[in-house]
Image: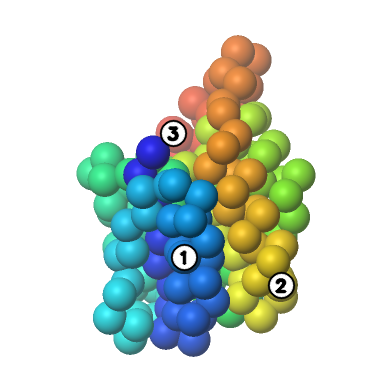
Amino acid sequence: MKVLIGSDFKSSSFKNSIKEYLCSKGFDVIDKTEEENFDFFETSKAIATAMLNNEGQRAIVIDEYGSGSFNVCAKHKGIVCAQVADEHSAKMTRDHNNTSIITIGSKVTSLEIAKKICEKFILSDYSGGRHQIRVDMLNKMA
């Protein structure tokens, strides 16, 4: 599975640690912000566009608080994004909402928890069924 990852310039070392962890777990991680000089708007736009172009199956965007990146990603039609701060939410947003992008705040989430969040998000599947009605509604928005 291809996983896109990106961060703003203030969170690049946090992102690099998560990227290294995910690679050690065998995931194909594509860093869309290797230059380390993007702000959260540019990073989020690049990740959302790459997801819409089918460059990856999941994506993770990191900024200081997660909310700025969430706002940008969620504005793209066809993207379901969630700001996540715990493992259970990472699983459930995939399971019920078919979320393709999560955002994490590097200043409000510990690195160890962020690693677990990312792994749980990547490994979780979408249940479909009754949840598809809500996903269809979300995809009509933006």
Image height check: is 140 above or below 28?
A: above
Mark 1 vs mark 2: give the one in front. 1
Distance of label 1 from label 2 (alpha carbons): 16 Å
The residue indicated by pointer 2 is 110
Horizontal side, residue 90 vs residue 24: left or right:
right
Q: Position of residue 22 (x, y in %)?
A: 49, 55
Mark 3 vs mark 2: give the one in front. 2
Mark 1 vs mark 3: give the one in front. 1
| Amino acid at dot 2 | Ser
User: In the current view of this chain or complex, which residue is farthest to the left?
Assistant: 53
Of callouts 3 and 2, the N-terminal one: 2
The residue indicated by pointer 1 is 20
Image height check: is 122 above or below 134?
A: below
Q: Residue at x 32, y 57 (%)?
A: 30
- Which of the pair 114/68 is nearer the observer? 114
Q: Quadrant of residue 48?
A: bottom left
Distance of label 1 from label 3 (alpha carbons): 36 Å
Give the mark count: 3
Q: Looking at the image, can residue 130 be seen?
A: yes
